Image (cartoon, rainbow, N blue to C red):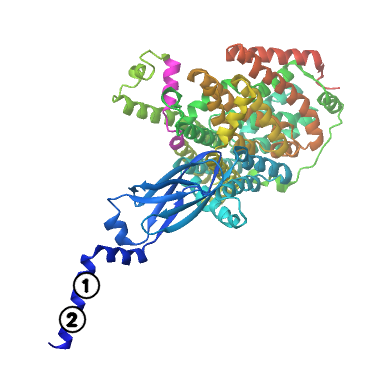
Amino acid sequence: MDMKKLAGMFIIILGLWGICNPTQAQKTDKRKFGFNVKANKKAVIGEKEVTFNISIFDSTWKTAKYVNKPLFFTIIKKDKKEIRKDTMLTFKQGAFVYKTKIKSSQDITFTFNDTNTSMTLRVKYFPTWMSILPALMAIAFALLFREVIVSIFAGVFLGAWILSGLGVFDLIPAVLTVADTYLMKALNDGDHISIILFTMMIGGIVAIVSKNGGMAGVVKVLSKLANSARNTQLVTWLLGIAIFFDDYANTLVVGNTMRSVTDRFKVSREKLAYIVDSTSAPVAAIAFVTTWIGAELSYIQDSVQQINGDAKFTGNWQIKEGAYSIFLNSLEYSFYPILAIFFMLILLFTRRDFGPMYKAEMRARRGEIQELKVSAAENEEFEPIKKEYLKWYNAFLPIMVVIVGTIIGLVYTGMDSVAQKLGTSDVWNNLASLNEGKDPGTIRKVGIILGEANSYVTLIWSSLLGLILAVILTVSQRIMSLKQTMDTMANGFKTILGSVLILLFAWALASVNKDLGTGDYLTGLIRDSGLSAYWLPVVTFMLAAFVAFSTGSSWSTMAILYPLILPAVWKTAKSSGLDPTEAMNIFYHVTAVVLAGSVFGDHCSPISDTTILSSMASGSDHIQHVRTQMPYALTVATVSIVASSAFFMIGVPWYLTYLISLGILFGVVRILGKPVPEAV
């Protein structure tokens, strides 16, 4: 036989023998076989379950032999103690899965029984108290550097580093995780993008109505009412309420505009700065449509999503209210901002002051007004481009469009959402089915509809319409060219960029805290301390005040505390045995006092941006402004704490609480205050 034919037959026989001999086939595959193990966590905080996904390298083994057949592994822990021999793993979604609880740092070795191929993976264990470190670092850095964005970034980085294993070689991966995981997660949320857009558009509106003279026109109309020292202060107060949509705009516009008027009637610069400061952040914080509302709604919504995503909360313990509805309900407990606003009216109508403010007012009445020059450059952003053309409606109309548009949008989206739930267009007459079969009444019906509203979409709609109208009014009256108007709008966007960055990193910090289980740790601390859930509002108020006073920023305080406190409060209320209704009232209360405490601390802080702006815009010495304002802020805060604790615990209705609190403040002014004459 030809040698070539013999060789060919020999090769064919060898091939057939290899196919038909399974032992030899396994040896061939055995040589090629490999696998990889990945854990869903490189480190855990407290005892947690870790999932290991085992992927087969060789495609033949993966798809042909083991997809429909379990694999057997021997899994060994750090101490060489065999967990279980012949552990059977099943194939799920492209990998073999093994789950186990980690109670200490472990080196876990996976050995494939058929081949003795091994791979070791280390999972680190950290105690639960470390979960609070990122938030503490954010606070500490804010105190040390007085810079919010860097401080919150440091907190996010520390959290990512802990979750990466806290090793030296984990430093760079942790930095990258901040960007590619936590910041991207924050930006990959539709609600977050909505808040950014709304905040920027409000910034654009503020810039345009300032430059086109509309805001100065509003001031001009109201300033005509000023004909005495008391009326001048009242007009300043009214302007502070009227320019509610942004605290910076409020401060700079009211302070700069009313300074010459208050000087004419011998009102001290310190008193002007106090009125300006106390109608800026307190008003912007609780008004329905402001540059603050977007951030507040975002923090509330993220906390609610975190709570509802927790398997511990089911049925009635799921929070079904929308963020806007929670915000509106929390206003009942916003004691400090509301009392601070009305405390000024008590001072005005009694014509009394006390403490350092009384001395400042008496000096001013004698004509000794302590001036502080304000540079034109600092106020240029809000100076009208045509000082002779100041029309109030150029500001009033765009702002009214935003307000009315928001109200209509909330009702429209709320009705639409409820209609889809009920399966009928007759929403108003069928709301009983969403209220345990009982007629909810008019107020509750409105609450249900607003609770179902899409506030994010509504805010975008209304702010866009307001921005468009502001542009049309400005260009059509030839106050500015279209290019100038667009440049002004862009400058408005820039002014809000800092706030947007704070929001972005705050969302990232909230996500890190969730992964670390910070809320669970805080809940455990509160539970173990024996602190009643009813004391949480008071403790939260004082904590927020301390952070805001130390950092000088209400925004940074809200960004740090809201994601920590709200989930912890809900868990504490449940573990304390409260029913969901009681828990929700405490949730509303704490939502309000984080904001209220932030504003109070901000008022007393000499490094607060709004406090500095208030003294600057009013032409007051900054330290004098802080000295004269602090006794008033402390007085209101003390009454607010009493209202948040004693009255709340004994069940006094919120409206009576406000009346009693105002009565107490009136009594304090009558006892401590001394009459200040119109002139000396």
Which residues, given as a range, are shown in magenta? 442-458
Q: With respect to residue 69, does 435 lie above or below? A: above
What residue lies at 62% left-to-right and 26% top-to-bottom?
Answer: 528
Which residue is nearer to you in this view: 87 or 501?
87
| Quadrant of image for the C terminus | top right
Q: Circle 2 is placed at which residue position?
A: 8
Res 636 → quadrant: top right
For the residues marked 2 and 1, what is the alpha-carbon distance in whole angstroms?
11 Å
- Tag 2: residue type? Gly
What residue lies at 28% left-to-right and 56% top-to-bottom?
Answer: 65
Asked whether the viewer can see residue 35, the reply is: yes
Q: With respect to residue 243, does 65 lie above or below? A: below
Q: Circle 1 is placed at which residue position?
A: 15
Q: With respect to residue 613, does 24 lie above or below? A: below
| Quadrant of image for the N terminus | bottom left
**Left or right: 222 with respect to 429?**
right
Q: Residues within 10 Å of mark 1 (few under 14, many from 20)?
A: few
Which residue is nearer to you in this view: 177 or 4?
4
- Tag 1: residue type? Gly
Asked whether the viewer can see residue 228, the reply is: no
> What is the chief secondary structure element of the magenta stretch?
helix
